[in-house]
Image: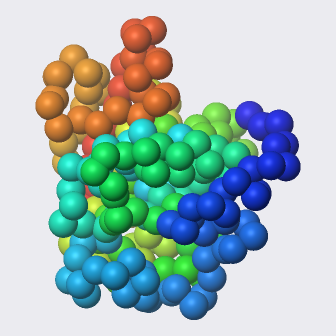
Amino acid sequence: MRLRNKPWVSEAIAEYDFVYSKERPADETQRGRWREVMGVSPDTPLFVELGTGKGDFITRLAAGHPEAAFIGIEVQQVVLYSAAKKLKEAAPPLTNVRLLAFDINDLERIFAPGEVSGFFINFCDPWPKARHAKRRLTHRNFLSRYRKLLAAGGKLSFKTDNRPLFDFSLEEFRAAGLRVEDISYDLHRENRPDNIETEYERKFSRFGEKINRCEVYFP
């Protein structure tokens, strides 16, 4: 969905020093140095959420795992602003998160091979038309790129309410020779205490939509 342009966002988002905005973008200077940039030790796990939305998920995830570092990527800066406000209001303050207004198609420009411990993809665009399959974030072309950026034993956590996309993704994971575990076709029925909901997930699960989830491990 195309969001209405809000010119004031560019100025407002500049107040958050943990956000790399379109005016202050992430670039090759951070590549391979994210732990240093974030002021954490070299052995700190670094996780990246692709499509962080309004920030519910990454805020709660980071709060529950202070031992790790997290980067949320969102192409829509107006949406990222909502995530930035949420993180700023967190108590106690969260210092282990950075937000990037960035196009996922350029991941290799800001991450070095083996730099990332794991990716999260939550409720991405399903691109339902067959001719758009290569745009799906779980297409094998994207998987090969994640493989390069992930450290050995890294993983991808994937959630969607779109069953055709989930079935497609499982086929892609297996075709890529990846190990798929913890598959669920109705996550909320399992009532798992470790599940962190996104804004989208909370809204649509109330309507009875089933949530699909799996963990994908890269060699």
14 lies above or below 5: below
From the viewer's perspective, tell me whether residue 56 is left or right of residue 73. Answer: left
- Identify the residue at image location x=60%, y=69%: 20
Which x, y percent locates residue 147?
39, 73
- Identify the residue at image location x=49%, y=38%: 123
Closest to the observer, 198 or 94 = 94
Residue 34: quarter of image: bottom left
- Identify the residue at image location x=42%, y=27%: 201
Residue sitting at the far top: 207
Which x, y percent locates residue 183?
23, 38
Q: Is residue 121 visible?
A: no
Closest to the observer, 55 or 186 = 55
Q: Which quarter of the figure is the N terminus placed in?
A: top right
- Identify the residue at image location x=25%, y=87%: 42
103 lies above or below 63: below
Colouring convention used in this rendered image of the protein: rainbow
Q: Which quarter of the figure is the C terminus placed in?
A: bottom left
Residue 148: quarter of image: bottom left
Closest to the observer, 115 or 29 = 29
From the viewer's perspective, tell me whether residue 101 is left or right of residue 53. Answer: right
Q: How many marks?
A: 0
Closest to the observer, 33 or 172 = 33
Which x, y percent locates residue 51?
54, 50
Q: Is residue 77 visible?
A: yes
Which x, y percent locates residue 107?
56, 72
